[in-house]
Structures are given as structure tokens and as C-alpha cells.
Amino acid sequence: MVDPRSLEPMPEVDWTSLALRIKTWGRELGFQQVGIADADLERSERRLVTWLKAGRHGEMDYMARHGTKRSRPAQLVPGTSRIISARMDYLPETHERSWSQIADPTRAFISRYALGRDYHKVLRHSLRRLAERIRGEIGDFDHRVLVDSAPVLEKPLAAKAGLGWIGKHTNLINTEAGSWFFLGEIYTNLPLPLDLPAGDHCGTCRTCMDSCPTGAIVEPYVLDARRCISYLTIELKGAIPVDLRPLIGNRIYGCDDCQLVCPWNRFARLCAEPDFRPRQGLECAGLLELFSWSETEFLRRTEGTAIRRIGHVAWLRNLAVALGNGPSSATVVAALQARLNHPAGVVREHAAWALRRQTRNKCSR
């Protein structure tokens, strides 16, 4: 027997009004901005294909593994016609404090996005709550929440949604907030009205390009990941190319230089989200202290953060490079020598390289 209620027409939805409420709910849930885009990424797909063919993704095979699902949202989530894109600010400290850490060769610099709780968890939780708000308004609807959990061109989608433009360093920039923010999406088939994309405001500025320690921004809007410190210290699994090691300095997990120098980031505000506040003193930690961590301590001290995913071996590899780039001392030499017997060959090799650098640094004084 058919339930007569199922024959009743669905209530009409004012999609423009709903879009405005979605943006209000997003702000209430901790996002600084929410925008809506369609699923047409043809231009971005062409740029992605060119970038992949040039091999600039390095060992990030996952960038090509999913074919066109990354640039065609409806292939990833069938029926997708709209993307609700949201940004959440994370800047935990002033630029001056970050530069101070970078300037001290005995201390470790960790990209500021990774100092607090893993952003995947924070944004995913808030986006799911946003989806629940929508469901409470219109009933069940087709959607999928995404935060780096599937092949998504999040920056082009956010740009189409009016959250900012992709700068020459390939990060998204917002005129009111700079670039210190995370992005997350809700893929859906709801016929929501679209937001206008933001215009490009980089102009003739090339500060980010000129300031990149390794010259990874090979031309405006093109990043060669194989030279990028974030790739070298996070994504690369094996040995860091010898010619790039001295350029890394004391950056042991990611690099923020292109953001720190961007003129638009003078408008960035310190974030109020407690989950993004630095943990375990990592914002000002010393290299030797971190290099002394056992695997057990590494796992304990990085629990709940994005840092944990690189593993203890890559952690030691990165720290060895930073110690090799720092001032020579008997304490540093002893710490490096202690890692020459490490089970992982990549740790032994980078420790030996750092020891040779320490010897040269000592002789040059």
C-alpha cells in the first residue's frame, strides 16, 4: 500500500534564500566565508594536464592516478552540479614571530598550518554540521563532504566560488584575509545560485617568486613541486636532492616564505579557533630537542596533528638536513653521530651528509 504522504509534492525551496542562510550558518560554525560554484573546471583541467605532463608533481602519483575525477566533480560524485566551498582562517602568530624562528638556525621552523590540530578533522566536522543544517531545512539531499579526502581541485573551485584568486605562488588569496586559511567543500546537486569569481590582484608583483628559497615558483602561477620545500619535507619519501638541502635551511616541515612575504597577508588576522593554536611548543622548538625524539615520543607529541603523517623516519631526515645547515657544535655532531646506526638508510645518509657539513662549517669559522 502506498503511503499517501509520499504523493504530496515537495515543498518549494527559495534557493537564493537558502544560499544566504548557508553562508550565515557557515560563519556560525567557524568558517570566515562560504561561496558557491558550479562544476565546470575545463580551464583548470588543461593547466593540470600540462603540469602533470611536465612532471612537476614529482612523486605525487596520486595527482594523476584518478584521471579526470579531480577536475570533473560529477565523475567523482555523480550528479554534482554545485560546490559549496568554505574557508577557515588558521594564522596562529604574527609574521614577525615566524621570521624570528626562521632566522635562528638552531631552531626548527614548521609550517604554521601544522602547529595545531589536524585541519582535516576540524573542517570535516564543521562541514558535516553545515550539511546537517541544510538537511534540517530541506530534508535529505545528495551531498558529500570533502577535505583533502578525495581528488579535488579545491583552489580553482574556491576561486570560482568567490573566496579569492589563485596567486602567482599558486595559493588562494583573499583581499580581506590574505592566504592563511584552509579550504573544504560540500559537493551537491542542489540548484543554488552561483557566486561571482574574484578577480586577480597580483598585478606585477613577484615577491613570492623572488623569495622562494629553492626557486620552486618557476613562472607566474606555476609551481614545480620537485623544488618546493613543502614537497621535499612532506611528500617526498626518499632522499632529498643534495643540491637542494642547503637551501632548505631550518625548515623541517613545509615552508611559509611565499605567504610571509605576500603583501596581501598584511590583512590577515590571527585566528580565534582554539584547535589551531600551537601544540607541544612546536612553534619555537629547537632542532636538537626534536632530533632526540624516539619514534614513540614523536607519535605521542604529534598526535592529532598533520605532522604525524610523515612518520618518524622523514622527521629525522628533515631534522638532519636542518642540523647540517646550522652552526657547528660538539653537541650537534654527537647527536648526528648517534643517528648513524639508525635502521633506516635514509636517516643514516642524511645524518652523514649533515656531519660533513658540520665539519666544513667548523673549518670555515
Image (spheres, grey):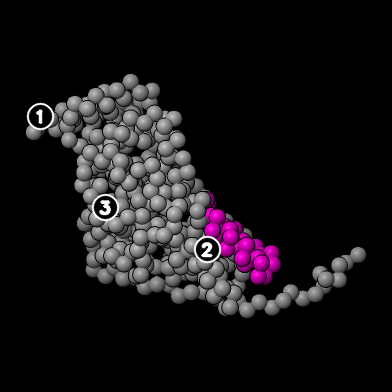
Q: Per the image, is 130 magenta? A: yes
- Answer with the quarter of the image where residue 245 lies: top left
Q: Does 288 sit above or below residue 206?
A: above
Q: Amino acid at mark 2?
A: Leu
The residue at which mark 2 appears reads as: 29
Disc marking residue 97:
3
**Where is residue 5 shown, x and y percent of the image?**
83, 71
Q: Is residue 237 visible?
A: yes
Q: CA distance from mark 1 to mark 3?
A: 32 Å
Residue drawn at 44 percent across, 71 percent down: 162
Q: CA distance from mark 2 to mark 1?
A: 57 Å
Q: Per the image, is 76 magenta? A: no
Circles 2 and 1: CB atoms closer than 8 Å: no
Circles 3 and 2: CB atoms closer than 8 Å: no
Instruction: Describe residue 95's horizontal placement relative to residue 21 as left or right.
Output: left
Disc marking residue 363:
1
Residue occupying the far right of the picture: 1
Most foreground residue, 95 or 339? 95
Q: Does 168 sit above or below residue 108?
A: below
Q: Determine whether the residue tagged by mark 1 lies in a helix, strand or loop.
A: helix
Disc marking residue 73:
none
Q: Which residues are magenta?
A: 124-151
**Where is residue 83 shown, x and y percent of the image?**
53, 65
Residue drawn at 23 percent across, 66 percent down: 205
Q: CA distance from mark 3 to mark 2?
A: 29 Å
Q: Amino acid at mark 1?
A: Cys
Q: Nearer the viewer, mark 2 or mark 1?
A: 2
Q: Does 234 sit above or below residue 211?
A: above
**Where is residue 322 shown, x and y percent of the image?**
26, 37
Quadrant containing the N terminus is bottom right
Labels 1 and 3: the sequence-earlier one = 3
